[in-house]
Image (cartoon, grey):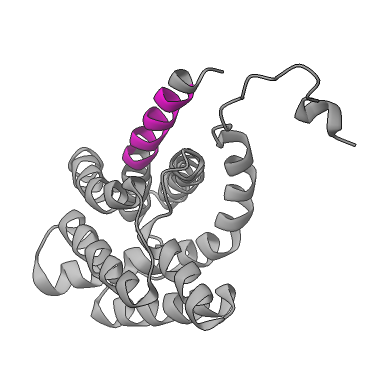
Amino acid sequence: MSPARIMTRRWGQLLLGLFLYGVSVALMIRAEIGLDPWTVFAQGLEVQTGWSIGLIVVLIGLGVLLLWIPLKQRPGIGTVLNVLLIGPAMDLALLMLRTPDELWARILMFAAGLALLSIATGLYIGARFGPGPRDGLMTGAHARFGWKIWKVRTGVEVTVLAIGWLLGGTVGLGTVAFALLIGPLVGQTLPRLRVPEPTRPSTPGTAQPSSLAA
């Protein structure tokens, strides 16, 4: 694939992935059976302030980016667009979605949102334009202080989950399902959706990478 086509695919994946991410979170919000920790936090702030949850998501993302400064992390264009686009996509999708009355339909809505989120994550991370703000926070803390990433992630997410719940965010079965399933799901989508590096023309007498593979 030529560099121009690869760049076109990367931008397409990034923008589509961020839009679908917002839609997927909106599906899980409307399901009303529990949310991921950061959305619980955002929803709690929505309850307390009356602001739209999409605006709050943008503000949280900007706040997290400020924490990158002492960690000496540099955001990519994908990081900045992650902060700016997911929130508005959530608000737009929430205007068009309604919570079903039946529990089974709400469970299906949550499952659809979770599956779509794993695809959206694979799309925007696979575009290779930089990590999301929260992912960069984890890796930055690891690089700066040597803390294990899983410990940083667990500590931060437990904290925001507890605060969000106290503020009125939705915690439930969906929260547990998200914690258990999002890792394996993204583990399936990310390798399949990662945009390949541009191929370089070979020179005479130079072996191609494929011929060197064991």
Looking at the image, residue 167 lies above or below residue 3 = below
Q: In this orientation, does residue 179 appear?
A: yes
| Residue drawn where x is 63% and y is 40% of the image | 191
Asked if residue 123 lies left or right of residue 1, the reply is left
- The answer to which of 20 and 195 lies nearer the viewer is 195
Q: Give the range drawn in magenta.
A: 6-19
Magenta region, main secondary structure: helix
- Point out the image quarter for the C terminus: top right
Extreme residue in the front direction: 204
Q: Quadrant of the N terminus?
A: top right
At x 63%, y 49%, the residue is 187
Which residue corresponds to the image point at 49% horizontal and 22% vertical from the top-left? Answer: 3
User: In the drawing, does residue 209 fall left or right of residue 119?
Assistant: right
Q: Quadrant of the rendered structure where residue 70 is?
A: bottom left
Kindly indicate the quadrant of the structure image that contains residue 63: bottom left
Q: With respect to residue 116, does 61 lie above or below?
A: below
Image coordinates of residue 177 in percent, x first then y, are 54, 61
Give the residue displayed 56% in from the left and 35% down from the top: 193
**Closest to the observer: 3 or 87?**
3
- Is 10 covered by the magenta stretch? yes
